[in-house]
Amino acid sequence: MQKNDHIFFTFSKTISALRGEKGCPWDQKQTIKSLTKYLRQECDELLEAMASGDNEHICEETGDLLFILFLICQISAEEGHFTMDDALQAINEKMLRRHPHVFGDVRITDENALNRQWERIKSLEKSKKTN
């Protein structure tokens, strides 16, 4: 197990404990809906940190945003909707699909071609969802 794998697992366990029987009352009472305001707040704080260019502050606010995202996944898993693994699997598959110039044999010559390819792939994905 790599160091990053370990901390990911450790943080997942922390979130589970916060939501667990002996966990934190604030974390236990949160719902997907109640987290909306905190998600907005943490996104705004991360954007401010990024604008400041203060990498320590960016790191802290990125962690705060990850906390909210992990909570969302934990609550969703508890409700039987999806897990963190599901969300990561879905985004990984999407990135692989949308980057055939990296993970396939497509050649891209400039940024305009890249943008056209991206939009074409997104459009195909949307049409598959509606069918």
Image: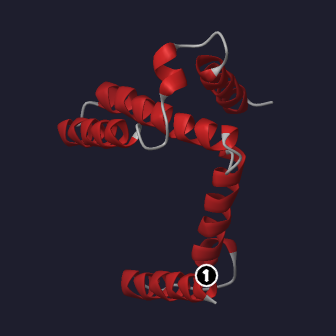
Percent from the top left, x then y, of residue 90? 66, 61
Label 1 Cα crowd, 10 Å radius (few <14 / some 14-19 / many 20+): few
Q: Is residue 31 above or below residue 126?
A: above
**Is residue 99 visible in the rendered structure shown here?**
no
Q: Secondary structure at mark 1?
A: helix
Please name the residue shown 68% across and 42% down the image. Answer: 77
Q: Quadrant of the C terminus?
A: bottom right
The residue most toward the top is: 22
- The number of numbered discs placed on residues in the rendered structure image is 1
Please name the residue shown 66% across and 24% down the image. Answer: 16
Q: Tell me where residue 71 sits by quadrant.
A: top right
Percent from the top left, x then y, of residue 63? 44, 30
Q: Is residue 5 above or below residue 36?
A: above
42 relative position to 84: left or right: left
Q: Tell me where residue 73 sits by quadrant.
A: top right
Q: Is residue 61 above or below residue 91?
A: above
Percent from the top left, x then y, of residue 45? 26, 35
Q: Tell me where residue 58 sits by quadrant.
A: top left
Residue closest to the eye, 9 or 112 = 9
Residue closest to the eye, 96 or 88 = 88
85 relative position to 37: left or right: right
Please name the residue shown 71% across and 46% down the image. Answer: 80
Residue closest to the eye, 7 or 20 = 20
Q: How is the image coloured?
A: secondary structure
The residue most toward the right is: 1
Q: Is residue 21 above or below residue 9?
A: above
Dot 1 amino acid type? Lys
**Is residue 106 visible in the rendered structure shown here?**
yes
123 relative position to 15: left or right: left
85 relative position to 50: left or right: right
Q: Quadrant of the N terminus?
A: top right
Query: Where is mark 1, residue-wise?
Result: 129
